[in-house]
Image (cartoon, rainbow, N blue to C red):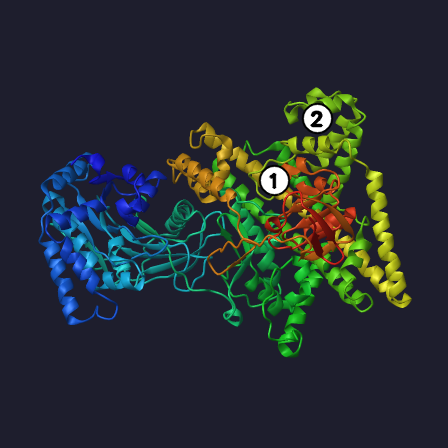
Amino acid sequence: MEKKEGCFFSWSEAFLMSTETVGGKGWNLARLDRYGFEIPRGGVLSAAVYGNYLEANGLKSSVQELAQSITMTNICEEEVLAQLTDIRDRINSGFIPADIQEQLFMCLKETGVLERPLAVRSSATAEDSARASFAGMHESFLNVHGPEDLPSAIKGCFASLWTTRAVAYRRKMNIKDDEVQAAVVIMEMVEAKAAGVGFTCDPRTGRQDILLINANYGLGESVVSGMVEPDEYHLDPTPSLPTVIAKKIGTKKSQVVVKEGGGTEIVPSDKPERNQVLEDGQITQLGLLMLRVYEALGQGEQHQDVEWVFDGQGFVIVQARPVTVLPRYTYAEIKDQPDIWSSSGLRDSNAMVQSTLNWRLVELHLNTHTIEPIRSTGYPLVPGVQYIRLFEGRVYLNITAFQWLDYDSVGLNPADYQSSFGYPVVIKIRDKSPYHGIVGMKRLRRLTKILLKNLRIWRHERQFYSRVKRTTESWQESGFGDVLDLACIDLYNDLTSMLKEVTLVFYAMMAAAIYPHIVLTKALHKYLPGRENGIINGLMAGEAQITSAEHGYRLMELAELASHDQEAQRFLSSEDDSLSWEKELKDDSPFKQAFRVFLTEFGHRGTDELDIINPRWGESPAYLSQTIRNSINTADVSKLKTRQKEIHQRALQEVQQKVPVYRRPILKYWLKRGIKGAEMREMSKSILVRVFGSFRILALELGQRFEERGIIQQQNDIFHCAWSEIFSILRKEWDGKGLTELVAERKDRRRKMEERSLPVLITGEVSKHVEPVKLSAGSSLTGFGVASGRAVGRARLIYHPNEGGSLEYGDVLVAPSTDPAWTPLFLRASAVVMETGGVISHGAIVAREYGIPAVVNVLGVMKSISEGQTIEVDGDEGKIVLHD
């Protein structure tokens, strides 16, 4: 039998095979080897050998007959137990065909392990998969000595498919017997000073915010089998380096060691009972290694169970598998309601598939935003509840947990601010009086604490913004070229501290925008029932100084300047590099001077700007050039201002007709606060983007260093690396071997995920794609009206602002969501419709400012409306009517 037909595969060969050939354990080890992890020398005996073995020994039909006769109800009957024992005995007493055995020994000799003590481990074809782990179901044999003992160990692995526990597990998991074939991992034994198991979560409780490590002296079998009380270490994975937060030192009365002549034995421990197996520095190093496994094998989404060995010099991984089942971990009061994950409130800032490097930053930002303001009130948070996660690379918020947290901590009923955040659904709240009794008083006290803290932040907003702007601009100017490798980790820590600080300010500014809107809505409902949102939107039209709306005004002014500047027009219509404007345009060009000012003020912004993989406008102004070029013939700032005044005046007249004079001053006050809140919210977003931009500067610096050292192929590959991988390289714990392969695979996976569309809502763990029904003429869709007015136009379905060239003046812009890069498109649109969003989302604020009718939170709108279809948008009623 030739090797290419598949008998024994080295790790590199096994990677190219499927789990049907090398089994789950074997393929995961092959992946670890490919990605540069330290694993033992060895490879995998193909699952096909198991089938050949049964056939050569006349056991195939016996196995098939036995498999068909066993059910969950009869598996413990004496007759069945006897039959299982008999088939195992027959498998163990068979012979491995000579040609297979000969080739196996030859391959092991080439690998350099034939005469070494070996670990022989079952690698069943359904094992260690996301569907089922098969943990402890099949046999492993340690300290197997050479060609004499190896065949028996292999046969033992084959026979272990037919233990009572293995068969019962398959029946329980509804896995057919013929789906499970026995590949066998054969690898060199590692001399174990200590060993154990690590999890990138807590599999017992379901907490996903800690790393859990169990450790004992000697081989890891004492830990895996539960024969001793091992050390247990808990680590916080969120800092740059995992931090030990709790330790339980086990008694460790015994350990498993290798036995002379083969096999293992249990011996009393020769170490003091209360000795710590791993030093704190080693625990941190192992924690960082586990995070690398989580990122490499679990793509930052699937938690991992890792078996490790410490050989006195470093850590070697001997197995890694997905954690397939985690208990649901949430607040007791909402355990009867499912976790509902929504991307609705996040799409105007994190709509796209996250880059590997960015996800950790977004997770830190959103968890800080969700948890820290509540924590500061003294509310007893349930630690470790998961509020944020990825589904196929996209960010989702656990709105079940988030809504309950806001309600139970400070009494905010989600029904009252559903339109503010754009929640597609609202959880059930049984208590209708959040501020009643002792519990209610506590909620009020916490709410007061948050309001007072927010007031302090509002008072000092300008000083804070100036400080962050100065710091980030200085980083932009100087770069990080002089920072030593290890100091880059300290710099990362400084940046994350600033990110947390800016996030808390952003939270306060969100509150400044939300609360006045809630007050105004309730106040106007009495006099203008059903019209309150439309009136508020109209009153706010053109009244605020919105930084992201200012982008659009200024780009429109640049388009007007370009319309009178032939040199600027030639440049904008040419194929020249967009960065060449400084060289190509004369210094006395009004357009050039205005464009320079624009980039000075807004060059830190960009498309999909909260992912640091994307360049800022200052780095790549191509999008700005395209937008200006497309607006030259339609730009008219004065016309826009006139429309804003008309909308504002109509709303004001309606208030004067319906609202009593004595009520108007308080409405005027809250309107002023709402306008100010919208300004503050958008300015804080601009400052937040500056901090993300600083992370981008650091990433590009590291990318340049890694490219020069041959660790990655090009500078921008750094965005497809995980921070844990970068820190391991900077600390010289890893040389970066295998990172280029990992980056290439991540790029490919990202492309595939970007081609898929995910639903706005996911219940539980699995996303279900439901295609909206195409609606006929005369049908209508409803959402939240967030900007006043009505308009009729052709629908232009645009998924990314770079597609904005197809939007003609007067069309209706229909989009999944919008961020500031979309702002210029609003100025050509007669109305805006978005699949997600709320009253304080970016698109809503800008549409109100421009006086453009807008309806948001229209689920499935990108599939329900056809490209070019005429639609009518009613921003007052929150309705879209479809025409022919």
Q: Give above or below for 193 relative to 571.
A: below
Secondary element type, mark 2:
helix
Question: Can you say whether 703 is above or below 279 in the image?
Answer: above
Residue 89 occupies which quadrant of the picture? bottom left
Q: Which residue is mark 1?
A: 693
Query: Of 266 and 155, which appears nearest the observer?
Result: 155
At a point 64% along the width and 39% down the height, the residue shown is 801
Q: Mark 1 Cα within 10 Å, few/some/many (few <14, many 20+)?
A: many
Q: Which residue is mark 2?
A: 572
Q: Which image quadrant: the N terminus?
A: top left
Q: Based on the displayed image, in which of its 4 quarters is residue 604 positioned? A: top right
Between 667 and 455, the one lying in front of the other is 667
Whether residue 83 is situated above or below residue 704 in the rendered picture: below
Percent across and percent down for residue 846 are 73, 47
Q: Of helix, strand and loop, which one carries label 1? A: helix
- Residue 296 vertical placement versus 651 (above, below): above
Left/right placement of residue 515 relative to residue 180 reads right
- Which amino acid, mark 2? Leu
Q: Which of disc 1 and disc 2 is earlier in sequence?
A: 2
Residue located at (24% from left, 60% from top): 166
Rendered image: mark on residue 346: none
The residue mark sitting in front, 2 or 1, is: 2
Would residue 94 be found to the left or right of residue 129 on screen?
left
